[in-house]
Image (cartoon, grey):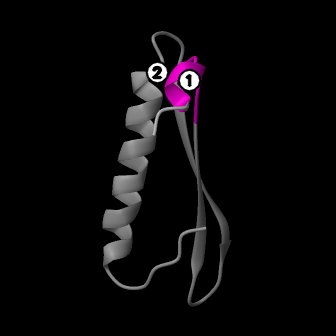
Amino acid sequence: MYRANGSAIPLRIGQILTNLVGNALKFTDHGFVRVKLSMASVDEHHAILRIDVSDTGGGIPIHEQARP
């Protein structure tokens, strides 16, 4: 879970989402990339968002996962 205070939150969420979607698109030649946003909980001071990124891509090949 990512916790932060202040106005940097929208910027940081945007950066994270851009990276996740960019990687999903990079490894998905056909099929889909889906982004789902839901509010897990909310009270008068906090909101917990859930962001799911899923795709039908093959992922990173095993031989590339081992690279430092």
Residue at the spot 36% in from the left edge and 85% down from the top edge: 6
Looking at marks 2 and 1 on the same chain, the residue that comes earlier in the sequence is marked by: 2
- Number of residues whose C-alpha sits closer than 10 Å to that of mark 1, classed few (under 14), some (14–19) or many (20 or more): few
21 to 33, vertically: above or below = below
Q: Residue at x 49, y 25 (%)?
A: 64
Residue 32 on image: x %, y %: 53, 20
Residue that sits furthest to the right in the current view: 41
Q: Amino acid at mark 2?
A: Phe
Boundaries of the magenta span: 54-65
Horizontal relation, residue 11 to residue 20: left or right: left
* Residue under pointer 1: 59
Query: Residue 51, percent across and down?
Result: 57, 52
Where is residue 60? Give x, y as percent.
53, 24
Q: Nearer the viewer, residue 36 or 27?
A: 27
Q: Which mark is residue 36?
A: none
Q: Is residue 61 visible?
A: no
**Local crowd at mark 2 within 10 Å, few (<14), some, or many (≥20)?**
some
